[in-house]
Image (cartoon, rainbow, N blue to C red):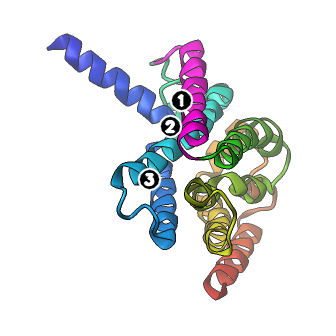
Amino acid sequence: MKSLKKMKQTFSWYLALTKPTIMLLVMITGATALFMEGSLLNEPLRFFLVLFALYLTGGSANALNQYFERDIDALMERTATRRPLPQKKIKAGHALIFSISIGVIGVLIFGFVFNWLTAMLSLATILFYSLYYTLYLKPNTTQNIVIGGVAGAMAPVGAWTAVTGEFALAPWLLFLIIFLWTPPHFWALAAFRTDDYVKSGLPMMPVIRGINSTMKQIFVYTLILVTA
């Protein structure tokens, strides 16, 4: 029983690396694109395989993000007590191996089961979020969330191309909705946790520009989202 309990706990720590709450949104938007496209509604196995591959690739990007930000996460109250790496529940090297492994599996599923366009899109998204956003954008610009939001909004595009092998307008409209939703959502969180971000040294909008300026930005993006 103790062994089983330990296995469950270890599984929960590795699952936490993938940021399951965020990945739920990815699954919902990916599934929405699949329902809109319609081809896999009579093929439940392939339908769920698309979502599984989306989870693996998105989870890989999130896990790599936590690997690279483990020292920063240790400084912030919100992340220090919730994420496995700052709590030393998982060794950093093990987290890196896990992150890369699930990403490779997800990309290969897209490539061999569906098509290589989606595989390359998924790989590009992983690299964009885990390297360009995490290591360059986030520490250097207040617009990090805006630009980094591209990665989080790609799920419907990836799901659509997995089925069709080509781009279309509909998934890009879903992409636009998610892209516009992302900045006000995360800026509101950052405004609530300003002290945390001051400790981290990250140039988040509320820290650098102030709460009033951030609220104006949130209003603008929300207005655009509502009218889009």
- Is there CB contact under 8 Å for labels 2 and 1? yes
Closer mark to the observer between disc 2 and disc 1: 1
Q: Which residue is mark 2?
A: 18
Within 10 Å of disc 2 (Cα), the crowding (few <14, some 14-19, many 20+) is many
Residue bounds of the magenta highlight = 90-114
How far across and down, in percent of the image, does residue 150 sit?
72, 57
Marks 2/3: CA distance? 11 Å
Report the disc number at residue 102. 1
The residue lying at 70 percent from left, 82 percent from top is 224
Is 142 placed above or below 29 here? above
Query: Which quarter of the figure has residue 112?
Result: top right
Q: Is residue 64 magenta?
A: no
Count of numbered marks: 3
Residue 81 in view in this figure: no
Q: Disc number at residue 24?
A: 3
Where does the image place residue 206, in percent across and percent down from the top left?
A: 72, 58
